[in-house]
Amino acid sequence: MSDVIVIGGGVMGLLTARQLVQRGVSVTLIEKSEPGTEASWAGGGIVSPLYPWNYVPAISALASWAQDFYPQLVEQLLEETGIDPELYPCGLLMLDPPEFTKAQAWGKAFGKTVQAVDRAFVQDREPAATSAWQQALWLPYVSNVRNPRLLQALNVSLLQQQRFSLVKHATVERITPTGSGVEVSCGGERYSAARVVVCAGAWSAGLLASLGLQLPVVPVRGQMLLFGARPGLINSIILKDGKYVIPRRDGHILAGSTTEEAGFDKSTTADARALLLQHAFDIVPALRDVPVVQQWAGLRPGSPGGLPFIGAVPGADNVFVNAGHYRNGLVLAPASAQLMVDLLTGATPIVDPAPYDPARAREPMEMI
Ligand SMILES: Cc1cc2nc3c(=O)[nH]c(=O)nc-3n(C[C@H](O)[C@H](O)[C@H](O)COP(=O)(O)OP(=O)(O)OC[C@H]3O[C@@H](n4cnc5c(N)ncnc54)[C@H](O)[C@@H]3O)c2cc1C
């Protein structure tokens, strides 16, 4: 029997497990398919919220902590596994961002560079970008991480740990607090631990409903395109009209993303492809000559305001949740996992945990 069962092997579950194991806690992670194959795989890997000033300070606090932590995380993972998550400090260029003044005020308040830049700057940094814009902002501190590699490295690293065990292709159907601990049922199998952490992304609400918590977390489909471009066509993440292009180190460019209410349907659609192509060509006209090599969809765990639920599940002893990160799970994950583990181990939390308290799910909330 492990000390803790983590349900879900996305970025949240893998990082929560990693940080628990690093603190001497034994962990069983239960995953319904293979680890790292859902939203955390499908995401763009931008290590920042898209328009960070549009979120509550509690999101900026986690994002800021995680942005500082990412370089050491990827360095450790590379050393432990030989897999490079390819953190790429490429910066984020915003063309015609909404709320220019609010953006700069937010930068000052959070100690982040949000720099107004002119045509010469943009032309020099991104010669292939469109010239059809009026204002531009440059956020040099933003990186992107190659999320499928990050997940692979986290998984391989965990599998090297004696205190870790993985149960895959097992869907948790029920969580039952037993007084002294928790029992988790998957098909005919039962697993027990002192505590359980639900990191099941868009599926978390379904798991917690039987415990009396109506967690307002819903799937929000996001579709993405991948261009097989040559290295150097773009050098930064470029964001315009809510859509973006992201350069990977090997030249591939991701173009994203849609936000669709389609339940748990992960299909890709021709409409989304056409929309994403139109935006990508609008941002970088030369992409018209570059082949699209892949299209995919993932299910974000949507939550009101995108503010995750991190902490004890009210009314269910020894059950915790770390879910609901909506569009920002990859940037927030290291901080979110650290906070979750602080709460589980009684350590001083890295940030005030109150804004993320799952007890707020008992109050009426507007979705997303
Ligand atoms: C198109 C797209 C673009 C995105 N871009 C970015 C970005 O650039 N930057 C950013 O920060 N974020 C981005 N995101 C958001 C980010 O990907 C998510 O917020 C994050 O991956 C959520 O992580 P998670 O671990 O909570 O969920 P998931 O990765 O979905 O993991 C949940 C896991 O739980 C498992 N599971 C579910 N139910 C059960 C069960 N009953 N039993 C066992 N296992 C179960 C699932 O199989 C899955 O592996 C994007 C998302 C999408 C879809």
Image: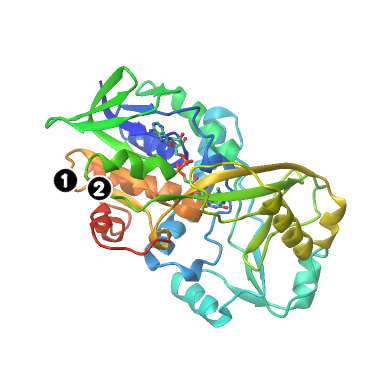
What quarter of the picture does the C terminus occupy? Answer: bottom left
Quarter holding residue 81: top right
Please tell me which residue lies in front, 357 or 143: 357
Mark 2, Cα crowd under 10 Å, few <14 / some 14-19 / many 20+, is: some
Measuring from the top left, give residue 189's x and y in whole percent: 31, 18
> Residue furthest toward the right?
289
The answer to whether residue 44 is visible is no
Q: Residue at x 54, y 34 (%)?
A: 37
Name the residue: 55% across, 54% down: 260
Q: Amino acid at mark 2?
A: Leu
The residue located at (74%, 59%) in the rendering is 280
Q: Are marks 2 and 1 in contact (CB under 8 Å)?
A: yes
Q: Nearer the viewer, residue 89 or 190?
A: 190
Q: Report x, y in % for residue 181.
A: 17, 30
Q: Position of residue 83 (x, y in %)?
A: 60, 32
283 left or right of 310? Answer: right
SS state under label 2 = loop
Q: Image height check: is 357 above or below 200?
A: below
CA gap between label 2 and label 1 equals 8 Å
Q: 81 above or below 242?
A: above
Quarter of the figure with residue 176:
top left
Residue position marked by numbered label 2 in the rendering: 213
Q: Residue at x 19, y 48 (%)?
A: 314
Which residue extends farthest left? 179
Q: Is residue 157 above or below residue 334?
A: above
Q: Which residue is mark 1?
A: 315
